[in-house]
Image (tube, helix red, strand yellow):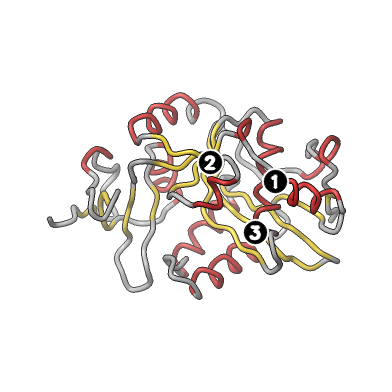
Amino acid sequence: MPIPWIESDQAGFPPVEQALTDPDGLLVAGGDLKTSRLLDAYRNGIFPWYEQGQPILWWSPDPRLVLRPSQLKVSRSLGKLIRRGNYQFSFDQNFPAVIRHCAEHRSDSTGTWITDEMEAAYTEMYRRGFAHSVEVWSQARLVGGLYGIALGRVFFGESMFRLQDNTSKLALVFLVKQLQLWDYELIDCQISSDHLKNLGAQEISRPEFVRQLAQLTPGAVSAGAWDNNQITVAENDEFQIKNH
């Protein structure tokens, strides 16, 4: 079946119900990666995912993997690693380095690459206050992290990396615990993953996911860098916060 195409000057997306089942969730190709289009995509349960040399491909898989902050599962070994205090954590202190590490990590795996075009687009979203990064540091060296988009009470995870064992998991645990204190209700994990399921993520149907987005993404969206002075999770969970 031919993949529908949208031009760069054409607004909007087809209904997600029109997404293919093979490959699962492929909805449309084309368009662009302007901030306005990306925000429209995320609000409607759609995200870009493609390889270098391909057109931009937009996806809305069914089912969808999500993590509710209140359902986070932290293993005993991961909890011990946090309490040792060997790592420091921060938000939005080095977004360009985080996305660059994610791109390098994924280009060495079987996953879809983060293209130069995507890297530039998400860095622009960071500059405009919609994209955020989590950094994990060891002796002032960046050793793990992740990035994604925040809209309303939903965080849309995009990619993570680790340079030491478990540091990407540490980044996620730190993020989820702080998002819970900020009254976020949903984290979009996009595609099924065993290691995310082990942390409490669950699959829900696409219609249910879209319904929840309609409830959770409208209203006030706090665009801007996350201030590390507002981090409160460390008070109860023994995270060490990195200062500038």
Q: Quadrant of the N terminus?
A: bottom left
Q: Which mark is residue 201?
A: 2
Q: CA distance from mark 3 to mark 2?
A: 25 Å
Which image quadrant for residue 187?
Answer: top right
81, above or below 154, in the image = below
Looking at marks 2 and 1 on the same chain, the residue that comes earlier in the sequence is marked by: 1
x then y, percent, for residue 22 = 23, 53
- The type of residue carrying mark 2 is Ala
Residue 228's place in the image compared with 141, above or below, is: above
Q: Is residue 157 left or right of residue 233?
A: left
Marks 2/1: CA distance? 14 Å
Measure how far apart labels 1 and 3 are at the Cα level. Answer: 28 Å
Quarter of the rendering occupied by the C terminus? bottom right
Label 3, secondary structure: give it: helix
Which residue is at the front of the view, 8 or 104?
Answer: 104
Coordinates of residue 132 in the picture (x, y in percent): 62, 49
Q: Specify few, some or many for label 1: CA neighbours under 10 Å numbering under 14, 14-19, or 20 or more.
A: few
Outermost residue, front side: 76
Q: Which residue carries the number 3 mark?
A: 95
> Residue at position x 29%, y 42% from top?
12
Image position, residue 78 (x, y; %) = 73, 51
Circle 2 sits in a helix, a strand or a loop, which is it? loop
Give the side of residue 76 with respect to residue 11, left or right.
Answer: right
Marked residue nearer the N-terminal end (1 or 3): 1
Comparing 243 with 60, the one in front is: 60
Reply above or below: 105 against 24: below
At 44% from the left and 66% from the top, the residue drawn is: 111
Q: Quick check: marks 2 and 1 in contact, CB under 8 Å?
A: no
Q: Nearer the viewer's eye, disc 1 or disc 3?
A: 1
- In the picture of the structure, the residue carrying the numbered disc 1 is 75
